[in-house]
């Protein structure tokens, strides 16, 4: 629940802030361009009390679960209404946008840039833009890459352009996500940083070298999960407001892709296709011109697109969670979700493609509204198939499933075909549901 509204440093009396509060975070689906957070509130103001605040002031929205929004006011509208006592009041609708919105008007690029990794380029763009707080997720050394690692991009001459457009281009070449958080931080998120469980890293060990047994090798703990791992939040189906709709559409299939790369004119291209998919769905082709530097970079990106999109996959429409029904810890966890986090919808009605469905959160819409004299709230999650983010099950995910040997599976299966209902072992599912 949002219970504190601060506008231009002034805490507004909640009696005069109407129940209709809406906050949007992230994007609506995988692959969409950069989207700034936004928030809309409605404020009642008595006659003779015209507020001095206007465009450009800062709006904060907070609640028991923490900060829900931080951004600049970009639009204000004024209407009038008559209260029950006959007095005429003003009704202000205030809309604010997160820091990503400002990147669209901040021009950068007055010095040449070298050839570099996309993570380094993202950091360069964000630093030059002057944004107050930013983070690049998935820089080399963060963790071992299991897919979706950084790619090299070409050097760039002096060419002044809006920072937002440059980030959009970079994200489209590499399948990254760009968004801002409720705390006001701008994030460039590579696919690799969406990995479900990260291997134990040296930085995770907080003791001294002498504290490790003399015979212990680093390879002995390679399979141990890092404390930085983020396990999915489990959402039982009785906490969802109504049954989500399953969708299977040919429009999402891509089975022939060409990627332009390098500095030559015309560009060299990598051309990949999936003959089995073409046989089933006809040719579904896309060309992507990029500033990826080399052949290996283009092959990696083309392979990602074909391997994750050549086959039909069931997905769910937006899932609306009834926040009023959640216990406190789960309530705070759900409101803390940001783009790239993961959830598991548990106990879905049958028949359906899965009983439990893992998904990646791409964004959400939070709404606070009045109903029967009481305030209610809900959050609608925009979800994507984990395969699109190259989040694949590992063989270890099946370690406690009896009979799970490779020979027990159809020999024509690919690893990408594995049933997502089995991604979390039974023991792990019960652990995170507790």
Image: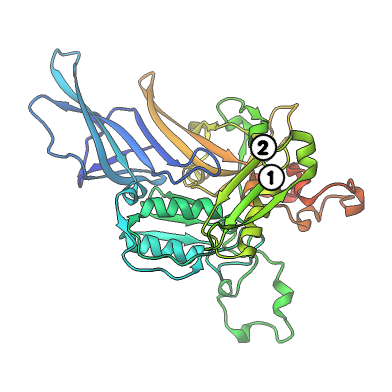
Q: Residues within 10 Å of mark 2 (few under 14, many from 20)?
A: many
Q: Residue furthest right?
A: 407
- Residue 283: image quadrant is top right
Give 345 or 254, whichever is nearer the viewer.
Answer: 254
Q: Residue at x 33, y 68 (%)?
A: 111
Distance Cα–Cα, label 2 vs label 1? 35 Å
Q: Quadrant of the N terminus?
A: top left
Residue 344: give x, y in percent of width and height.
Answer: 64, 42
Give 428 or 57, whichever is nearer the viewer.
Answer: 57
Whether residue 131 is visible? no
Q: Residue furthest left?
A: 48
Q: Residue at x 57, y 30 (%)?
A: 240
Q: Are marks 2 and 1 in contact (CB under 8 Å)?
A: no
Circle 2 sits on which residue?
Answer: 346
Q: Which mark is residue 53?
A: none
Residue 150: give x, y in percent of width and height.
Answer: 56, 63
Provide the secondary structure element on which disc 1 rests.
strand
In the rendered structure, the answer to whether residue 68 lies left or right of residue 15 reads right
Residue 244: give x, y in percent of width and height.
Answer: 61, 28
Between discs 2 and 1, the one toward the N terminus: 1
In the rendered structure, the answer to whether residue 55 lies left or right of residue 302 reads left
Provide the secondary structure element on which disc 2 rests.
strand
- Residue 158: image quadrant is bottom left
Q: Residue at x 22, y 29 (%)?
A: 77
Whether residue 144 is visible? yes
Looking at the rendered image, the disc whose residue lies closer to the viewer, 2 or 1, is 1
Using the image, determine if residue 84 lies above or below residue 40.
above
Q: Residues within 10 Å of mark 1 (few under 14, many from 20)?
A: many
Q: Quadrant of the C terminus?
A: top right
Give 90 or 323, whichever is nearer the viewer.
Answer: 90
Circle 1 sits on which residue?
Answer: 256
Residue 275: give x, y in percent of width and height.
Answer: 79, 44
């Amino acid at each position: 629940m949002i219970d504190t509204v601060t506008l231009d440093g002034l805490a507004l009396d909640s009696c005069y802030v109407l129940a209709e509060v809406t906050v949007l975070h992230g994007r609506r689906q995988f692959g969409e361009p950069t989207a700034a957070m936004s928030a809309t509130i409605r404020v009642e103001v008595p006659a003779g009390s015209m507020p001095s605040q206007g465009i450009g002031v800062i709006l904060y929205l907070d609640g028991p679960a923490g900060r829900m929004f931080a951004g600049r006011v970009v639009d204000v509208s004024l209407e009038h209404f008559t209260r029950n006592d006959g007095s005429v009041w003003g009704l202000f609708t205030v809309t604010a946008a997160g820091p990503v919105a400002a990147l669209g008007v901040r021009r950068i690029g007055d010095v040449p840039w070298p050839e570099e990794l996309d993570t380094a380029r993202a950091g360069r763009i964000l630093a030059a833009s002057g944004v107050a707080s930013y983070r690049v997720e998935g820089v080399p050394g963060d963790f071992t890459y299991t897919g979706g690692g950084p790619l090299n991009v070409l050097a760039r001459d002096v060419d002044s352009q809006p920072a937002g457009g440059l980030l959009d281009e970079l994200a489209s070449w590499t399948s990254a996500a760009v968004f801002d958080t409720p705390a006001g931080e701008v994030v460039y998120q590579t696919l690799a940083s969406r990995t479900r469980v990260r291997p134990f890293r040296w930085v995770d060990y907080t003791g001294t070298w002498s504290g490790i047994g003399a015979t212990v090798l680093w390879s002995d703990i390679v399979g141990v999960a890092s404390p930085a791992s983020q396990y999915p939040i489990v959402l039982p189906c009785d906490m969802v407001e109504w049954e989500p709709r399953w969708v299977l559409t040919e429009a999402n299939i891509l089975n022939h892709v060409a990627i332009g790369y390098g500095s030559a004119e015309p560009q060299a291209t990598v051309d990949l296709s999936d003959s089995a998919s073409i046989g089933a769905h006809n040719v579904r082709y896309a060309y992507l011109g990029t500033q990826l530097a080399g052949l290996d970079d283009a092959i990696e990106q083309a392979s990602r697109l074909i391997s994750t999109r050549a086959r039909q996959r069931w997905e769910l429409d937006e899932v609306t969670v009834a926040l009023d029904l959640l216990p406190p810890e789960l309530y705070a966890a759900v409101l803390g979700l940001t783009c790239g986090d993961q959830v598991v919808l548990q106990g879905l009605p049958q028949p359906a493609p899965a009983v439990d469905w893992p998904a990646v959160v791409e964004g959400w819409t939070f709404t606070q509204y009045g109903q029967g004299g009481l305030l209610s709230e809900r959050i609608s999650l925009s979800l994507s198939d984990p395969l699109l983010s190259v989040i694949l099950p590992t063989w270890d995910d099946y370690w406690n499933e009896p009979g799970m040997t490779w020979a027990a599976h159809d020999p024509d299966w690919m690893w990408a075909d594995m049933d997502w209902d089995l991604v979390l072992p039974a023991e792990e599912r019960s652990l995170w549901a507790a």
